[in-house]
Amino acid sequence: MTYVRSTFRHPALPKNELGYTVDYYEGSLSTLCAGCGHDSINAAIVEACWQLNIEPHKVAKLSGIGCSSKSPAYFLSNSHGFNSVHGRMPSVATGANLANRDLIYFGVSGDGDTASIGMGQFVHVVRRNLKMVYLVMNNGCYGLTKGQDSATADAGSRNKTGHENLFAAIDLASLAIELGATFVAQSFSGDKEQLVPLLKAAMHHNGFAFLNVISPCVTFNNNSGSTKSYDYVREHMAATATMDFIPIMREITTTYEAGSIQDLTMHDGSVIRLNKLEKDWDPYDRLSATNAVRQAKRRDEILTGLLYVNENSIDLHELLNTSSTPLNALGKDDLCPGNKALESLNGSLR
Amino acid sequence: MKINDFVVRFANVNGTGSASANALFTKAVFRMGVPVTPKNIFPSNIQGLPTWYEVRVSEKGYLGRREGVDLMVAVNPQSIKQDYADVRPGGYFVYDNTKPLSPEYDRTDITHLGIPMTALCRDEFSDPRQRQLFKNIVYIGALATLFDIEFAVLEGLIGNQFKGKEKLIEPNIKALNLGVNFVKENFEYPFDLRVERRDLLDDKILYSGNSACALGAIYAGATVAAWYPITPSTSVVDAFASYCAKYRVDPETGRNNYAIVQAEDELAAIGMVMGAMWNGARAFTATSGPGVSLMNEFLGLGYFAEVPTVLIDVQRTGPSTGMPTRTQQSDILLAAYASHGDTRHPLLFPATPKECFEMTADAFDLTERLQTPVIVMTDLDLGMNDHVTEPLEWDDGRAYDRGKVLGPKQLDEIYNNGTAFKGKYGRYLDVDEDGIPYRTIAGTHVTKGAFTTRGSSRDEYAVYTESSETYVRNVDRLMRKWETAKELVPQPVFYHSGMKHESAHGDVAKGEKDGVIFFGTSIYSAEEAIEMLAGEDIKLDAMRPRAFPFGRAFVEFVESHERIFVIEQNRDAQFKSLMMIELGTDPAKLISVLNYDGMPITADNIYRQIKGNLG
């Protein structure tokens, strides 16, 4: 935890296309523990938004309750945020998105917030394919109440007190794929190289983009015997592919060895360029994605990177055929039928 | 002879198509210009169980339920024994005599009218479904002849009902005539219960509270509805959906200027509403008691984080699952103080469909003005029954009151000239000293006005804090807002000294020693009972509160009377408790008049209880 942040900024800090330096995308000072994985993820979010030239006021940040859900305060201070109630962020995000389809909705949740108390809402927001980024900062434990196991802790994993978890873990990424999520990725808070392009791709996805990010809890679950510790995750990580995210109209400059490259074109014309490491994995195939995750698990590996994407994703607004003008921008003239309509209605009720 | 003053009860089997036939009877009386009030008394069941439909016809315009059945249409073998016993001495018992009635049905104090409904339909129709459905129409035709209801009125109604499905008109008319002709050939008609044409309804309409709430939401510009199905509120969103289809589809693009989401539960439903209202759209949900219980968590967030929300609570008989298809006013305390910690919410109490329309529309203005959840407290009786009500009106000049929302220009002014904000926007600054701060909507300004909404304590600039002083300052401000709300919400209406109708001038009634308080659907029976008592020279002042919190006029009424009868439809005298909590009223002064059996309160009941107390 840093109590004082330097206000010094190098005068030569690069600016993005909007003329903002990266610090414009920062939030208030984090009150999470020093070394918390969540802070690294927050830094990756800041970086991704800066690189994508996002206008912060066009982003709404939403969260539930828990260490992870405090995070939105620590990035994008020029965005509105809503730190709602435990496990209920998906419903608040749904309403917010219905009100204004023109913003980017960035939801942050934790493993308790999503896999336990919020499981019902999580499952249903996936079904609705709400256009949002849903990021779980997954550390396998309840930090704010001092380290109890969460539903994503692996059976046999031990926490700081030596307590062994008896129950099978809920694998959120597999679950999301199974439920029909249209973009599913998994990553590690310590792997910014991977996380930043994943975040960028997620923000360009036309539907529900789910990111399950293992984010070790340095205080309660970073000991030996834990399967969510920094050491364990680093040693057991495998990736589907390395990737670049190329926004629309940007020239592709990165070069790769021939044969392993696959370009995934998003609905808006941007491209995810994959350098595949998993030979048999097809990012467009749900079954293949599930298989890859399971095969990795059998090898005692945590599979990271993009897992699945549906290039033809249709989001909730398209499903509901809502007006292209955001609902919150419609006025009385658009919405109120007026007294004349009432007179004819009265007539039909006599 | 009883002209325009009787009760008819239809005893049917649920799911046999009786509802639309019975409604035809109500509507026919209505079109004869005579006040009429129908009540659905139905089971929590889709098909097979007994269901009743009770119609009171009242020349004097009494629209509450009345005890005693003058004519029973008993076509349900399951309930026929009880239905038989329920007919008033001197009344009529209409039944299907295709099979003879067993010998124990031998009352001599009532008239038996056997109509072979099954046989008539069997002979006339070949389709089994029509044979079943038209039995209901046959008895409507028979009743119309007995009551002397003009046949042309029925024909007109059938014509309206099947507009666009003209093929169905002819068999319906045929079925009506089967009943008409049977009566003409076998009974003396018309008999001594009579519907005589009058012109007592002016331009009134026949409408249900749930439809009216939905229409109020349409007129108020609600664009997002999120809900979870629950009786008796489901038809609010059903009606909203059909009004949206009619009024809210852009004719050019074919796109919807609304979004309706059936949520996974009531928690999600209200979460979606709060998300939408937080983000600048008007949104609402409708539920009943069990749903309000689930929404408690969010209601606390809405109160503390100051997020506008409109919740329509169509109350039913609790606790727990209770009697889901019966009425009560038993969520008063639940709603008033919903959620943990020190919370309180404005409640609106519509009494008629017209008020459902108006108050739902008002609720959107109030919730955005006050930045706190507002709950419209209706009930099953109001929501799911048709009521004779004044025609709906909308002032086309009325602008939506979106409350204190800052736009980009105003934000710039704050930072350029200072204004009352002294140079910096603070989400929870009470610059107007009415307890209501200024909010901003996401996406408004590139660099100004962003803040994080949270359920945890924060300072005036929406920054998280655990400072005791700041916390106290904040919750005290919320009480200041509550004081502001007292005069903003719809004010009570008064009845001076035994008057049946509310006073036009709206002054606090205080001439009499004793007063009566009633709210919501108790209105009909309370007005009737007050008139019954006035007829015996027992004069009471009355007040019908229309909202919580209670303002000055409410307090003045309470203080101006020695004793006050508080009429409410729950066991625990919840409204009385609310008065004791909020105003510190001496409980000895408040005499409860209660009804909590799940049926709408009757005037006789109120009369008896007040009379009993006056000694």
Image: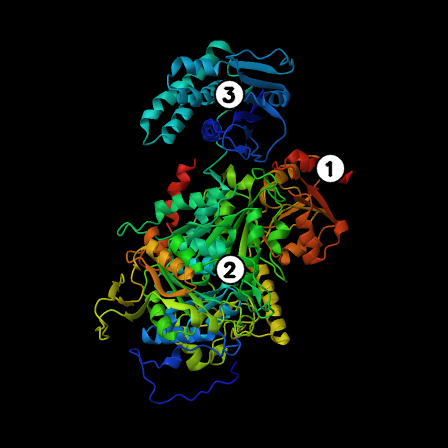
Instruction: Assign the C terminus of chain A to one quadrant of the image.
Output: top left
Q: Which mark is residue B611?
A: 1
Q: Look at label 3 and name its amino acid.
A: Phe
Q: Look at label 1 and name its amino acid.
A: Lys
Across and down, in percent, residue A121 comes to 47, 55
Same-subunit check for callouts 3 and 1: yes
Q: Look at label 2 and name its amino acid.
A: Gly
| Image mark 3: chain | B
Same-subunit check for callouts 2 and 1: no
In this rendering, the answer to whether B423 lies above or below B113 is: below
Same-subunit check for callouts 3 and 2: no
Residue under circle 3?
A: B147
Q: How many marks?
A: 3
Q: Secondary structure at mark 2?
A: loop
Whether pointer 2 and pointer 1 mark residues with C-beta atoms closer than 8 Å, the reply is: no
In the image, A222 versus B451, the foreground residue is A222
In the image, B126 versus B586, the foreground residue is B126
Q: Earlier in the sequence, mark 3 or mark 1?
A: 3
Report whether B334 appears left or right of B270: right
Across and down, in percent, residue B203 comes to 45, 38
- Residue at point 60% right, 63% down? B483
Residue under circle 2?
A: A87
